[in-house]
Each structure stands twice: as C-alpha cells, then as structure tokens.
Amino acid sequence: SCMLDKTRAQTFDGKDYPLRLGACWHAVMTTYPRINPDNHNEKLHIPKDRSVSVLSRENESGQKEMKILLGSDKIKFVPGTTSQPEVFVNGEKIVVSRDKAYQKMEGNEVIFEIYKIGDRFIALTSDKFDVSLAL
C-alpha cells in the first residue's frame, strides 16, 4: 500500500518522502506496462479498460483532492464542507452514506464500488482494477 498525508508520502516499498503538492495534479500511482518476457526491448500494451491512475493536488485551503481514473471512468474526491469529501463520478455528484453505497455496473459485473467507512472516510474498491483506496 501507499499513503499520503499533509507532509509526506509513503511508497509501496515503505519509503517516506517529504510531500508538497500545490495546485497541479501529481501522479500518485499509475499502471505501467510490463516488459515482454520474450523481447526485453518491448513493453506490453495495457488495454484502456485495465489502466489505472491516481492523481492528487492541494486546493486553496491546503486540503487534498484526489482523481482516480479507472479505464474510461473518472472518480473525483473533493474536500467538502463536512469532514466527508464530495464524490463525483464522470462529472456527476453522487451521495454516499452508511446506508447507501454507489456501484458502477457493466452488465452483471461490479466495476467499482464507493462506500462510507465510519463517520469520516470513504472507500473505493474495484476487483476488476485490483484497487482499494480509503479517503
């Protein structure tokens, strides 16, 4: 796992780095093509429906915004007036509560799910993209 807080980032390999994001979007995590085992000079293509990117930036008040790109879907977490962030899926605001989760479906398959954890956190999970985030 990796982690961001107000002053540092911890990478997947457990290393800590000082962090100051500013107003520009920064890549926190993205899929990266693997090397072809049969040809080390060639990278294997990642299909659009398997690509993942997690971006973050700070707003004017120093709070972090997150943008998650799962294939062609864009999920944005924006600090709200309460302790819980506002959530937008493909530009449309969604409401998540303890009693109501959000699921993006394709046929009978759940592509990703957004749900509330406790009073302050929202989680996003996707088995298809092998991603799990808590904000």
Image (tube, helix red, strand yellow):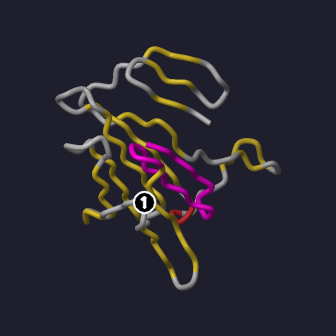
The x, y position of residue 102, in whole percent, is 42, 67
- Out of 105 and 50, give the one closest to the viewer: 105
Q: Is residue 25 magenta?
A: no
Image-based side of 46 in relation to 85, left or right? right
- Out of 110 and 27, give the one closest to the viewer: 110
In the figure, 13 relative to 42: above or below? above
- Residue at point 71%, 42% (across, down): 41
- Residue at point 61%, 19% (across, down): 15
The x, y position of residue 6, in whole percent, is 38, 22
Q: Point out the image quarter for the C terminus.
A: top left
In the figure, 65 relative to 117: above or below? above
- The furthest residue to the bottom: 107
Image-based side of 130 in relation to 51, left or right? right
In the figure, 25 relative to 39: above or below? above
- Out of 115 and 63, give the one closest to the viewer: 115
Q: Quadrant of residue 54?
A: top left
- Residue at point 43%, 45% (across, down): 121
Residue marked by disc 1: 98
Q: Amino acid at mark 1?
A: Arg
Q: Is residue 119 magenta?
A: yes
Q: How many marks?
A: 1
Q: Quadrant of residue 97?
A: bottom left
The x, y position of residue 42, in whole percent, is 68, 47
- Out of 53 and 114, give the one closest to the viewer: 114
Q: Point out the image quarter for the N terminus.
A: top right
Which SS class for mark 1? loop
Which span of residues is magenta-colored?
A: 118-135
- Residue at point 81%, 48% (across, down): 37
Circle 1 crowding by C-alpha within 10 Å: few under 14, some 14–19, many from 20: few
